Image (tube, rainbow, N blue to C red):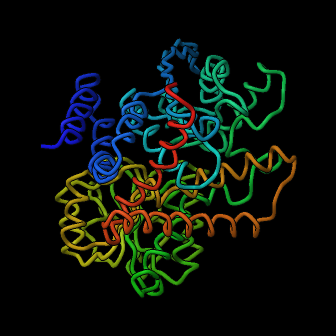
Amino acid sequence: MSATADKIASVRASIVRRDPEQKEFLQAVDEVFESLAPVFEKDPKYLEAFERLVEPERQIVFRVPWIDDNGVQQVNRGFRVQMSSALGPYKGGLRFHPTVNLSVIKFLAFEQTFKNSLTTLMMGAGKGGSDFDPRGRSDREVMAFCQSFMTELHRHIGADTDVPAGDINVGAREIGYLFGQYKRLANNFTGVLTGKDLRWGGSLIRPEATGYGCVYFAQNYLAHKGESLKGKRCVVSGSGNVAQYTAEKLLQLGAVPITFSDSNGYVLEPNGFTQEQIDHVMELKNVKRVRISEYCAFSETAQYFPGKKPWEVSADLAFPSATQNEIDEEDAKQLVANGVKGVFEGANMPSTNEAIEVYKSASVMFGPAKAANAGGVAVSGLEMAQNSQRLQWTREEVDAQLERIMKDIFDNSLAAAQKYSLKDDIQAGANIAGFLKVADAMIQQGCV
């Protein structure tokens, strides 16, 4: 074993020793660590940068007390992990979900570091959220929680310091309540949050960006292989923002989206969803906030499969767009057996490391989350630019920028893979390209 290999093993052991219980964070680190081994072997200075990078610059954990509609006190826990400011202000979303803990937020912030770097925009990385569950809560309760959450968070964020956005269960409603409380406390109107309403500083295409960007990424990967999206049958998981706009863009580019899902099961349209049907899914999930099973009352052709995942459906491409680790090794084997030739991640880390190995062994095209779903934060960065200029760009301008950024991400990831003799391993290439930009900045800025 070489001296560098010994050092790599030592760094890995120290990361595990420091946070042995943080399984999601360690999973994310391992996925990147393996890809970066050729970089460390070629130039050991980058291993020192990585050793610093895995330790967040700042971790904030705080109490969020609020009163529900029955006048009863509730207490949740809030988080903000400010991972890296090497490339700009911390940037990353807020997630409200019962599964949120420090490990989940750290893994998301770690992934965000590479993702933001890949966009080529000047953004650092952070992530935050709470174990609060907005499902079943009234608008007043959600507002009460958001105001209490921001009362503490506002001390740590700012347009040039840390700019949060939305994530799971943090949409337009929550961003509005959060922004309103920040404005009241800070007594200024700045672009401190992205994902805002168009009428007060938001950007066109921002709601669509993650889903649209994922499809643009898939389009570039398919073009590299001499193929196109036209006619491809696509299984999409989830039924939130990312899944909705993934399906919409697939339809626009000639593909056939055939599923949506939630934690209770999935719905299948054997002949593919039309735009009218996708619009109805949006109404069910964004306005009525009900389960995806309710869709079957609208469509005579739909089939609902309770307690099942959509990965059992035969298809050409898969777009996991729900949550982390939704595809395990057995799911991946099922996808391969069903003829899937490409997996493009709209959610954050939806595939386990074992699932990724199945993709690779079967030569399945794989668009990792940090590259394929970077469209959301890319347009958040464009929203920040518009806020700084006090301007609002047209839909066409933002969409063109998004399409260009996703092409650049694919091209840069491919180039990095080929530079290190990894052929077209886009997963490794995305990790390498994203890391080198951050690491070079860290080295130039000193040991801080």
Horizontal and vertical percent position of residue 243: 49, 60
Up/down of 227 relative to 304, above or below: below
Up/down of 176 relative to 364, above or below: above
- The residue under the point 36% across, 32% down is 51
Horizontal relation, residue 357 to residue 255: left or right = left
Horizontal relation, residue 390 to residue 238: left or right = right
Horizontal relation, residue 170 to residue 267: left or right = right
- The residue under the point 50% across, 22% down is 58
Number of numbered discs: 0
Of residue 243 and residue 116, the one placed in the foreground of this image is 116
Q: Return the residue found at the far right.
A: 390
Q: Quadrant of the N terminus?
A: top left
- Asked if residue 226 can be seen in this view, the reply is yes
Horizontal and vertical percent position of residue 323: 39, 48
Of residue 212 and residue 158, the one placed in the foreground of this image is 158
Up/down of 127 relative to 337, above or below: above
